[in-house]
Image (spheres, rainbow, N blue to C red):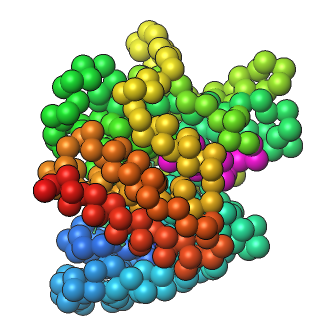
Amino acid sequence: MKRITILGATGSIGSSTLDLVERAPEQFEVLALTANRDVARLAAAAIRTNAKRAVVADASCLGALRDALAGTGIDSQGGAEAVCDAARMGADWTMAAIVGTAGLRPTMAAMEAGGIIALANKEALVSAGDVMMAAARASTVTLLPVDSEHNAVFQCFDSAAAHRVRRIVLTASGGPFRETPLEAMRTITPEQAVAHPNWSMGAKISVDSATMMNKGLELIEAFHLFPVRADQLDVLVHRQSVVHSMVEYVDGSVLAQMGTPDMRTPIAYALAWPDRMATPCEPLDLARIGRLDFEAPDPVRFPALRLARGALEAGGARPAILNAANEVAVEAFLRRRIGFLEIAAIVADTLECYDPAAPETLDAVLAIDAEARRVAGERVKDCVA
Ligand code: NDP
């Protein structure tokens, strides 16, 4: 029995993970499930999986969680520190699927406890890449990428021949606005932005896919996860989302991982690693799909990608600022306070006017994240005014 914990159990990744776990109850014992405020979904999942503990990050929801779990014997806890405590319960396998830098402390807490960390929470790695990877190297933890692109690279990357890798190519669907006339992009609504053509995901990452900031964050994520230089990382738009990413070697061989776009495949890979497990995902039918298209990303349409590339190359505090400003701007867009094109503009402005030294500790990363949020929040107010 693998003892597992799911941080962000009520989200899109959390639900897909639960789906796999619940199909193989003889293989998994659930230690802890966490959420922010979605008590109904959390309590239902905790009861179904007979979890030992359920935690809401928002302490004001603890009363409702206690009521929902009354008589079940499941321990209920509330507050951000309780999420970190749950992450330290000593699971063999932890899914880090909280959205945003809210997942940073819990993910680091899980890393202190050891075991396998299946990392979906890319914002944590983007913000605190050097600090997080140093902690990973100093611990016994195994970090497995869940993001479909990095999971694909992980499956194709021959670590024994890392010096023979020429390039990593991350594929991108291009999101829903790959062909939208540029003048029409100004009036894009949150509903249009979250309607991803190929993947079913949470709201924040769906907007990131639409701006292609998601691919920018993924460039930074890949830089930390794999032993390559920034200039060895490329992006290719591939609208069918069948080839999930590729590794090119010096002899000209290119290894790609393919599959139907369903996050349960990379999650299952991480759940069963180093073995494999069956999933209910639709098998890939290339004859039916017929063709696979590839094109270079359009730098005018997707300025966020350029901003992220700049942050990656500059390093230091830049990725944390990029990420924090993006989180603020996406949230403001989803609340209809700013327009779609203002997301990248706010990130650019924040990077422009805030340039602290590189953070060396987790607290320093969080301080930079907080200040970048404040600066980006001011920009949002300017846009609204
Ligand atoms: P969702 O928005 O669907 O879910 C987010 C989860 O995080 C929910 O369980 C939510 O709880 C919880 N949460 C939100 N805020 C907090 C907080 N302040 N403290 C603690 N918990 C919190 O996101 P996704 O599942 O789409 O994405 C999760 C992560 O995985 C993101 O980093 C994303 O970039 C990454 N990812 C997602 C993919 C996907 O297909 N969805 C693909 C690749 C990576 P509640 O429900 O109570 O709000």
For the stretch drawn in magenta, the main secondary structure is helix
Ligand 1: image quarter: bottom left
Residue 163 horizontal side relative to residue 277, left or right: right
Q: Out of 131 and 26, give the one closest to the viewer.
A: 131
Q: Position of residue 371 (x, y in %)?
A: 42, 71
Residue 124 horizontal side relative to residue 188, left or right: right
Please identify the quarter of the rendering in which residue 182 is found. Answer: top left
Q: Position of residue 179 (x, y in %)?
A: 30, 19
Q: Is residue 57 visible?
A: yes
Q: Position of residue 53 (x, y in %)?
A: 40, 83
Residue plotted at (86% across, 38% down): 163
Q: Out of 287 and 230, give the one closest to the viewer.
A: 230
Residue plotted at (72% across, 68% down): 134
Figure quadrant of the C terminus: bottom left
Please identify the residue farthest to the front as the structure is shown.
353
Q: Is residue 198 above or below residue 355?
A: above
Q: Out of 64 and 349, give the one closest to the viewer.
A: 349
Residue plotted at (69% across, 36% down): 231
Residue 234 horizontal side relative to residue 209, left or right: right
Figure quadrant of the N terminus: bottom right
Residue plotted at (20% across, 43% down): 339
Q: Is residue 201 visible?
A: no
Is 98 part of what is drawn in magenta? no
Residue 330 horizontal side relative to residue 278, left or right: left
Find the magenta span and give its range: 217-228
Q: Is residue 33 above or below residue 52?
A: above
Q: Out of 261 and 98, give the one closest to the viewer.
A: 98
